[in-house]
């Protein structure tokens, strides 16, 4: 057992918080909320689900950390974050009954370490950065694409698990857990060469661009299969994050006939994908240079959640709607809500609406009338769909920490009056 060396006061603080989290997780409302998530993701729900992603706002919402040591403060931060939505927001996030940690693993695409220059905002957070792109000209630099590097440190992960268990494991179970694997291929391209070079390369060097996309795609699949072979995959059909502020609760995974003895394969899991960086190209170019590669990866998984901030309506009918096992699609603030509402009505794909972050993130006071109108439009456009409302990309509350809770209250009031 890896005994953690902590001051007595740090240990006492963490154990108190662990008890509090466990108590919250056992509340009847958490069990009811969990069941609603299962029904929602399995396309059987009747009421829209709401989640407010809080990590960018923890500096304003979380209480001041009290532990003295770095180890204690890290665990304290996780515990407080697990309870934040319940205490401050009132949305549908479930307080977990576990302390989750993930395998220490990574993929370095083509063995190229991407360097970034960061800048701090007024709160000292390094949210913005500039990428130093290694590829300057695709035709001349394609030789830089070496084999990708996959790593995992099981020993370090298990030691970390034992450390946390020593502190609070007799109160709150410590669980190895995994969110959704992700494959944002266009982001990989932009990190390698930048947006301008990506767009010009499709025109100037189409053959080389397809070689690049094929390499990125195959290396992602190889990495995912490597995780499978190394027993590093974990089921993500519960409270696990499916990126983009959503959760994996579903009884449709790991799939009919699965048993632990069979091990976990990609087809037992959620996958997440997006292609924000292709908003400036035509649907036809997306279909030629990106979509076949996205689809090739998606075919390996059980369920797919697609999209971030990009408006999907222009590529929906011909491309995204044909993705295998698509269960959830992002309807961002830049998306044609009406078009997507009509497309998804009665379908097996969840309408995951991302309201504009401006209502809550800009200005100290919440304009309740304008916000209500914004949400009411969503409720009208999404009638006949399975609706999920996810708040993301809000980086400040301008000192008014009541705005998130009030926004959720307004949505619930509107749902009660207008959702059929």
Image: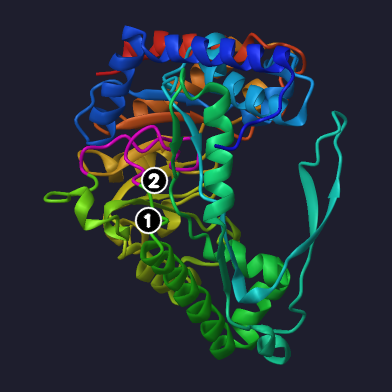
**Relative to 330, does residue 298 appear above or below in the rendering?**
below
Residue 333 on image: x %, y %? 54, 38
- 107 up-or-down from 89: above or below: below
Q: Residue at x 45, y 44 (%)?
A: 179
Residue 111, position as x, y percentages in the image: 65, 75
Q: Is residue 176 above or below residue 19?
A: below
Please give the name of the residue rendered at 50% of the width and 41% of the height, measured from the top-left corner: 244
Residue 395 drawn at (x, y percent): 70, 30
Q: Residue at x 59, y 34 (%)?
A: 163
Q: Distance from label 1 to label 2 (Cα)?
A: 10 Å
Q: Which residue is mark 1?
A: 316
Start-end of magenta stretch: 235-252
Quadrant where the C terminus lies? Answer: top left
Seen from the viewer's position, the closer of residues 258 and 283 is: 258
Answer yes or no: is residue 403 visible.
Answer: yes
Residue bearing the label numbered 2: 329
Magenta stretch: dominant secondary structure: loop
Q: Where residue 18 sits: x, y (%)?
A: 53, 16
Q: Give the mark, 1 or 2, whose residue is nearer the N terminus.
A: 1
248 relative to 297, above or below: above
């Amino acid at each position: 057992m890896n005994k953690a060396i902590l001051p007595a006061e740090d240990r006492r603080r963490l154990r108190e918080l662990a008890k509090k989290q466990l108590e919250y997780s056992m509340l009847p409302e958490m069990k009811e909320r969990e069941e609603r998530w299962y029904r929602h993701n399995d396309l059987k729900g009747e009421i829209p689900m709401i989640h407010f992603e809080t990590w960018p706002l923890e500096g304003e919402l979380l209480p001041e950390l009290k532990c003295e040591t770095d180890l204690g403060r890290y665990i304290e931060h996780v515990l407080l974050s697990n309870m934040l939505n319940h205490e401050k927001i009132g949305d549908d996030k479930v307080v977990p009954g576990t302390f989750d940690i993930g395998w220490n693993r990574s993929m370095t695409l083509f063995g190229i370490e991407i360097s970034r220059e960061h800048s701090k905002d007024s709160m000292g957070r390094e949210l913005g950065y500039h990428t130093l792109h290694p590829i300057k000209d695709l035709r001349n630099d394609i030789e830089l694409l070496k084999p990708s590097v996959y790593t995992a440190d099981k020993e370090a992960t298990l030691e970390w698990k034992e450390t946390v268990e020593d502190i609070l494991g007799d109160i709150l179970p410590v669980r190895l857990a995994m969110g959704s694997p992700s494959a944002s291929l266009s982001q990989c391209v932009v990190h390698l060469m930048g947006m301008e070079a990506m767009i010009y390369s499709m025109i100037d060097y189409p053959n080389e661009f397809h070689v690049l996309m094929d390499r990125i795609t195959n290396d992602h699949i190889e990495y995912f299969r490597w995780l499978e072979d190394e027993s590093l995959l974990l089921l993500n059909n519960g409270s696990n994050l499916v990126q983009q502020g959503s959760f994996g609760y579903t009884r449709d995974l790991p799939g009919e006939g699965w048993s632990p003895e069979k091990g976990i394969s990609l087809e037992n899991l959620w996958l997440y994908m997006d292609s924000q960086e292709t908003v400036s190209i035509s649907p036809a170019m997306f279909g030629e240079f990106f979509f076949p590669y996205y689809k090739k990866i998606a075919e390996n998984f059980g369920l797919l959640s697609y999209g971030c901030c990009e408006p999907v309506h222009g590529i929906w009918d011909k491309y995204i709607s044909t993705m295998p096992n698509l269960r959830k699609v992002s309807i961002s603030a830049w998306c044609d809500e009406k078009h997507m509402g009509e497309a998804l009505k009665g379908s097996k794909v969840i309408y995951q609406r991302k309201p504009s972050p401006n209502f809550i993130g800009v200005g100290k006071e919440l304009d309740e009338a304008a916000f209500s109108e914004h949400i009411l439009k969503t409720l009208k456009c999404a009638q006949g769909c399975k609706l999920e409302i996810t708040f993301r990309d809000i980086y400040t509350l301008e000192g008014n920490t009541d705005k998130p809770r009030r926004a959720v209250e307004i949505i619930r009031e509107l749902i009660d009056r207008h959702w059929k």
